[in-house]
Amino acid sequence: MLRQTHSRDTISILDIPAADDFVAGAKLAMADDNTTGRFLDQSFAIEDVKLAPGDDAAAAAKTLLDSGIGFLIADLPADALLKVADLARAGRALVFNAGAPDERLREEDCRANLVHVAPSRAQLADALAQYLIWKQWPKWLLVVGSHPEDVALGEAYERAARKFGAKIVEKRTYADAGGGRRSDSGVVQTQRQMPVFTQKAPNYDVLVAADENQVFAGYLPYRTWDPRPVAGSGGLMPTSWDASHELWGAVQLQNRFERMAHRGMNARDNQAWVAMRMIGDAVNRTKSADPQAARDLMLSPDFDVADFKGVKLTLRPWNLQLRQPILLTDGRGTVSVSPQEGFLHQVSELDTLGLDQPETKCKLK
Amino acid sequence: MQAQVKRARPLPQLAGEGGRRPDGVWPAALTPVGLRDRRPEPSWDHALLSSPHPASGHLPRFAEKGKLALLALALAATGPALAGAAYVTNEKGDSVSIIDTAKMQTTKTVAIGQRPRGLALSKDGAFLFVCLGDDDTIAILDTKSLRIVGALPSGPDPEQLRLSPDGATLFVANENDALLTAIDVASRKAIRETPVGVEPEGVAVSPDGKTVVVTSETTSMAHFIDWPGGESVANILVPSRPRFAEFKPDGAELWVSSEVGGKISVIDPVRKAVVQTFAFDVPGLRKEAIQPVGIRFTRDGRLGFVALGPANRVAVVDGATKAVLKYILVGQRVWHLALTPDDTQLYATNGVSNDVTVIDVASLKALKSIPVGSYPWGVAIAGP
């Protein structure tokens, strides 16, 4: 496993990443895989490499690959991830992107040995958009942060609005002026800044925030000038997983994770769990540790991933993105799950989320 | 299953009805004291009070010893005696609905405890065993008095259970602990625990009682355990999230449903290998919506019925060829099934629409939907 260190400067202290953030999910899945493996005479182990900011991911990947590792689960920024995937190709290793949401990794920069477990920004934005349309909140005030990731997420929301018929009444940018999150905690200056920032907006139903670096979105609920709900990076959030999710047997997974890690399972943990389960399942069923055999099985119609989101998950064969329902959560419980009823698709309703095959720019090589 | 309710024996009369809710169920705190069954009081208070989760918040209502046996009872003391009875666990309603199978009506609702799911009738029909997932116990309901008369040591979060053909042993899957627990019914003691895969769920017992099968959802296996040895003898990989297992009445085949994989695996219990898998295809429904769960066979093994979950249909399968003969539209998220003892009717629990569909086996048509409690999960039927 290759994982970057995530910032501890989160708006809520509940979101500060633990030391075993991400890898804990894979460790739980390893235990699950080994239970099956015990009956099949297979065993699974994890080599965990945690990268500090500035560390060379490619060098770390090379060390892992040289030691004969066939499966890499990564939580890395897009550029580092591509370097790792290209290195892995020489060794015929399969890389699982369980962290990066960037569209380009699934589109123009896609790789034949790079499987995307993490949902893309378009999948997340479409999931929220479907719900807001179902709720009949079509007029959005879009607030986008000043980081490049925020701009990309903002574009995903604009695209989702066009796709599902919402109207963005105004787009605003919230500039990151720097500074720590702990000193204010929302109740001093922030309480005065957020109403002013959202003042004089055209009539809107819901504020949609694009803020991947947790600069402002978490401060918006209850502080907007007009009394309006907040969604996106704060308020009602689209995500692959949340520690409060308990439907469809998820509570058993949450319990097992809590027992092992002594904390709740976040989206990164779950994505790592899914990746490790996919590897385990493929190795169990092919009776082989060959990454190519695993890839072939994962792309066959017989393969499905049993997560706890109501339906089976499968891979999109054209870009190796995992099809998945997206939870809409306020962090206290699952408010809804997209795709919403009524958004139809000729192949899979899960393909109403994110870029579909006819619009893909990916040519797998 | 044998008859469990005799017309000659009236239901107990109540001391008073002042606190009864309009639906006929006594709130636990107001349950009238002074009603005692003729049977000696079992030691279930001890089982509950020594539960390993004293801080769970679930226990206070069990805490007063005098009320223990009176926790829940239903009362339609003047109601008609039952013919055949179908017992339905209401997962969210924390209750058991009792349906008169002759009238096809819910006649009583009994508060049972938190998150009731798997259930089984004792061989003589006198008791109903109900897994209470959130109370970490199995309640024993007296089917005559409709009072809870005891509890079995299930381990945490029991979900499904099966009774051995001789009625002596209950096998329980403990989803949280990856264990199969065998409980001696007479002594109410756990006698054997066998480690199985992650999240064990479905339990089946072969007609000769010599093989117990557990399906584990995350491990995706059917584990064969010999009995009374209690040793795991084979572990068979099946498609994802196996939820339920059922032996054909002649024991020649075991069918395992995989909820996520969307398939039924047919296993030869002698060779201990999958000999066939088959799937379902409902025109107009997306693949993901077809999630097979509960399975039942007619006694002659000619027909198999499979509940298809959010596909809202019960599939009728030819027991020999495995061809799907028909999809019968029922309620929403059909979960588990039971046949009447004479094989004339099939009951299907519809978790989301809060009802039970009765299917006529001869014509393979849905006859009626009977409203029950909230989130009906399992069903067990006793004959008249």
Image (spheres, grey):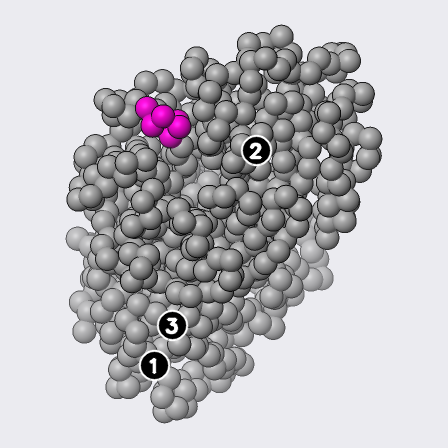
At x 55%, y 47%, the residue is B169
Q: CA distance from mark 2 to mark 1?
A: 52 Å
At x 31%, y 45%, the residue is B250
Mark 1: few, some, or many residues within 10 Å (few <14, many ≥20)? some
Which is closer to the viewer, label 3 or label 1? 3
At x 55%, y 9%, the residue is B80
Q: Position of residue A160 (x, y in %)?
A: 33, 46
Q: Position of residue A203 (x, y in %)?
A: 46, 32
What's the chain of the residue with tag 2? B
Image mark for residue B128: 2
Give, as a three-letter code, the residue at label 2.
Answer: Leu
Q: Which residues are magenta?
A: B339-344
Q: Position of residue A248 (x, y in %)?
A: 46, 46
Q: Secondary structure at mark 1?
A: loop
Q: Which residue is mark 1?
A: A70
Q: Position of residue B227 (x, y in %)?
A: 48, 57
